[in-house]
Amino acid sequence: MSNLQIGLAIAGGVVLAAVVAHGAWNSRRNAPRQALPEPAGDSPAAPPREPVLSDFGHDTQPITMPSVARRSAMDSLIDVIATVALDGPGTLVSGEAAIAAMPPTRRAGSKPYAIEGYNLSTQTWEAPVAGRRYGGFQAGVQLANRSGALNEIEYSEFVVKTQAFADAINATPEFPEMLEEVARARELDQFASAHDAQLGFTIRARNASWSPGYVQQSAARLGFVAGVIPGRLVLPASHEGMAPVLVLGFDTQAALAEDPAQSAIRDVSLHLDVAQVDRGESPFERMREVATSLAHTMDGVVTDDNGQVLTAQTMDVIGTELQSLYDTLERRDLAAGSMLARRLFA
């Protein structure tokens, strides 16, 4: 082999090696970023998962919250309430009988429905409990929620369910006038629709994509815990049983992939449901901090849902408008994060 052939062969080998190296470098550069191992001894205990919340009208048992005195879960501000008087003075109904008489579902159409008994021992309203005795009952249906206002058909279903319950325990119900309640429902729904704010930021990757593990690790450092839905992380409220302050989400399919490390995520969403979170949690301020921190850590950029970069000036304007919204809700006795607000905006 001549010197020229040898030189060409060497040059070809160098070029081939360079091509292979460049391809490997590009592959590493474009591969999803992976979570880094936690230093030994510094790994925090596995965080708790998102708590499952329950509220008036759901078919699940409510979370028991410590309190000095229990009051009715119903409120005439957002509920139609019908009294159910027992026939005969001094008549009592056992919790077992009340439970047996209750309808199988806790909804009238799309609206939460509930029955409470008056516990003479504690002098409080409560959902019927076996082993207790009640001197009267009340039934309620919610006037509005995010599915709309209570309509005539739903009101009629409320009446039918309550009448059947009353008949079963030998009681007599008394209902508010339907047209007045439906009109009240429409007014409440109009207010709620005009003051229902749900904010969303998007953090988009500038260059390399992210693996699910990398996103979870980055979010966990800011206090997020795993949600009940794959691809969902939540920032818990400071008080147990309250709605999460923020929700971070990414592609569910990426979270469920057989090899999540190979899943490429290019954007994650950060969500704040304003009415569900107490103003005292400073939710929007924390939303800004989280978005900025994640963008910095993960080499991303913060945008709105349309891909427009969100500037500090734009966020300042949003923050000012939110303060006005909080004030309006409080004047209506529907403060953000309160039980009434959480039920209405659900």
Image (spheres, rainbow, N blue to C red):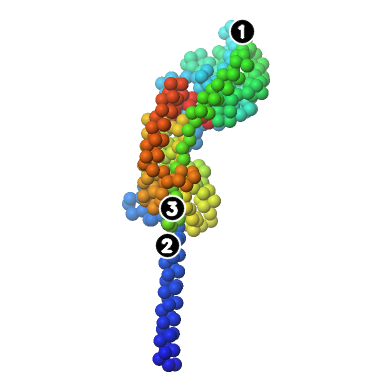
**Residue 108 located left or right of residue 213:** right
What amino acid is found at the position of numbered circle 1 in the picture? Gly
Residue named by callout 3: 205
Vertically, is 239 above or below 1? above
The residue carrying pointer 2 sits among few (fewer than 14), some (14 to 19) or many (20 or more) residues within 10 Å by Cα, namely: few
Q: In this orientation, does residue 208 appear?
A: yes
**Residue 47 located left or right of residue 89:** left
Q: Residue 302: x, y in percent? A: 42, 46
Question: Which of 118 and 268 lies nearest the eye of the viewer?
Answer: 268
What amino acid is found at the position of numbered circle 3 in the picture? Ala
Residue named by callout 2: 29
The residue carrying pointer 1 sits among few (fewer than 14), some (14 to 19) or many (20 or more) residues within 10 Å by Cα, namely: few
State how far apart marks 1 and 2 are (Cα).
Answer: 80 Å
Tag 3, which secondary structure?
strand
- Image point (32%, 52%), residue name: 41
Q: In this orientation, does residue 131 appear?
A: no
Foreground label between 3 and 1: 3
Q: How many marks?
A: 3
Q: Residue 59: x, y in percent? A: 58, 30
